[in-house]
Image (tube, rainbow, N blue to C red):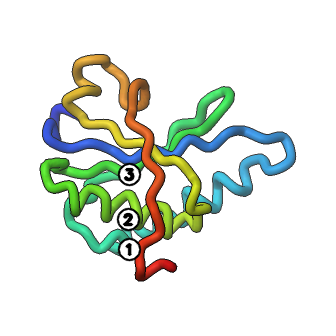
Amino acid sequence: MWEAYPRGGCWILKVRKRKDSGASVLGKMWQDIVLAAVGEGFEEPDVVGISLCIRRNEDLLSVWNVDNRNDEIRFKIGEKMKRILELEPSTIIEYKHHAESMQDMSTFRNAKAYVFAASENQA
């Protein structure tokens, strides 16, 4: 899908597997992301997809956008993702440009980490 949106990228949340929480937390997060994507909860037409990758030690939720040249829109999508998933303010999410993914052949490796500071609207 990188080739379809070479100017795009994706926001990534890594969810560590814990024996006590299991699939229920991930299932709720996935449900919330799906409903937000289908119901236009991101309020941004640049959102073009979502994905869930089940891995051995951690699972990965991602939200894909069509164009990353507008930082305001790109960061708005990341902030909205954190709100939809009701993440703690200190939670790190990552962003990776599709152009970089095409070079290193990985959606998730070498992604940049971000922590969003609370805005006046959120405080």
Tags 1 and 2 touching, CB below 8 Å: yes
Q: Residue at x 58, y 67 (%)?
A: 86
The amino acid type, in three-letter code, at marker 2 is Ala
| Percent position of residue 99, x then y | 19, 30
Residue that mark 3 sits on: 63
Q: Residues within 10 Å of mark 1 (few under 14, many from 20)?
A: some
Q: Quadrant of the N terminus?
A: top left
Quadrant of residue 18 in the image?
top right
> What residue lies at 86% left-to-right and 47% top-to-bottom?
20
| Label 1 sits on residue | 41
Disc 1 is placed on an element classified as loop
Expressed as whole percent of the image width and height from the top left, the position of residue 15 reads: 62, 43
Distance in Å between CA atoms under marks 1 and 2: 6 Å
Characterize the local packing of mark 3: few (<14), some (14-19) or many (20 or more) Cα atoms within 10 angstroms: many
Left or right relative to 109: residue 58: right
Q: CA distance from mark 3 to mark 2?
A: 9 Å
Would you name the residue on which mark 2 appears? 37
Measured in 3D between alpha carbons, the distance from the residue under mark 1 to the one under mark 3, in whole angstroms, is 12 Å
Q: In percent of the image, x 26 and y 56: which residue is there?
A: 74
| Mark 2 surroundings: few (<14), some (14-19) or many (≥20) residues within 10 A | some
Q: Nearer the viewer, mark 3 or mark 2?
A: 3
The residue under the point 60% across, 30% down is 55
Contact flag, marks 3 and 2 (Cβ < 8 Å): yes
Give the x, y percent position of residue 59: 59, 38
Mark sitting on residue 52:
none
In the picture, residue 56 is in which quadrant?
top right
